[in-house]
Amino acid sequence: MNDLNNLICREIKIDVTNICNLSCPLCPDTGRRTAKQQDPELMSFDKFKKFVDGIKVFPEQISFGSKHEPLINKSIFQMIDYINTKQKCLQTTILTNLNLLNSVSDLINSKVKNILIGLDGIDQESYSKYRVGGNFDVVINNIKLIQKYKKNNNLEYPKISIIFVVFRHNEHLIEQAKSFFNQLDVDISFRRTDVYNGFEDWVPINFDNADVKEKSKLCCDEPFKTVNINVFGDVYPCCAEEIIKFPIGNIFNESFEKIWNGKKMIDIRNFLLNKVQKKDIACLLCPIYKNNGYTDV
Ligand code: SF4
């Protein structure tokens, strides 16, 4: 972190739509959709291609689906294929609820490396308590189809991992979930839900993340390694909901490198390193900053 003017971005997280097919209760997007505060938007392949063509130094990873469901955008596999053709060693990742998979062969042929699935139940009842609108059997069937395709074609990728968010209603299912997903030959990791004001009843009582307890010197290192880009091309140093009105640039108007090591990003890094005091920086609104690295207290 010595030269803040020349950091290399490790991961770009990009949303190629601003909508989702599920209505998870703690997701801010669910509230916005219910209140009809946003029109659906999809990023076109041409716009995405122009952005990728402008990147001079590629990050190690590009992830699709920071806050919204990437499989809603039918160009998603064309986009991933394009990146993989351009930059062969790159890690490409889809974060998805996997309810909307139309074509296993398109997914595999895109050469996507990782699929991270938000799946926090072991049957329809435990799953749909949080993943409202989701179909457990559809997701499991899609996982099986991908695994079968890989096996039949002797493929190592994509790797499938389950992210099981631990809430109060499912914390007793952790051991069952481990053996259930083990049988499908997929990885599983458990993450404690954050506290959102007014939703404290969702927070597990007994489960804790081991890594949450680990104190870091920096309360947040996101702007030193990643950026988040929304469907309109707006760039943010992280995915914090609180800073949605404070983009640091737009990939359709300026080069990625200019934004990544631009003044706004450097100001945020200096602020987080306690090198400058600022009253107008978006991090001041963020629970992670306010709680010194913890999202739940
Ligand atoms: S402190 Fe919060 S708002 Fe600031 S970069 Fe980190 S996560 Fe984002």
Image (cartoon, rainbow, N blue to C red):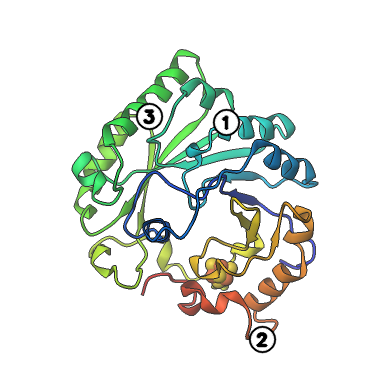
Crowding at dot 3, Cα within 10 Å, few <14 / some 14-19 / many 20+, comes out as many
Residue 277, which numbered label? 2
Q: Nearer the viewer, mark 3 or mark 1?
A: 1
* Residue located at (58% from left, 33% from top): 75
Crowding at dot 2, Cα within 10 Å, few <14 / some 14-19 / many 20+, comes out as few
Residue 236 appears in the figure: yes
> x and y percent of residue 167 in the render?
27, 57
Please give left or right for residue 137 compared with residue 212 in the image: left
Residue type at numbered disc 3: Ile
Q: Nearer the viewer, mark 2 or mark 1?
A: 1
**Where is 199 relative to 257, above or below?**
below
Contact flag, marks 2 and 1 (Cβ < 8 Å): no
* Residue located at (48% from left, 72% from top): 288
Q: Nearer the viewer, residue 249 or 239?
A: 249
According to the image, label 3 marks what residue?
Answer: 143
Q: Nearer the viewer, residue 58 or 254?
A: 254
Contact flag, marks 3 and 1 (Cβ < 8 Å): no
Residue type at numbered disc 2: Gln
According to the image, label 1 marks what residue?
Answer: 77
In which quadrant of this rendering is ligand 1 seen?
Answer: bottom right
Residue 97: image quadrant is top left
Q: Quadrant of the C terminus?
A: bottom left
Q: Nearer the viewer, residue 253 or 180?
A: 253
Label 2 SS: loop
Name the N-terminal-most of marks 2 and 3: 3
Please give left or right for residue 27 compared with residue 132 in the image: right
Contact flag, marks 2 and 3 (Cβ < 8 Å): no
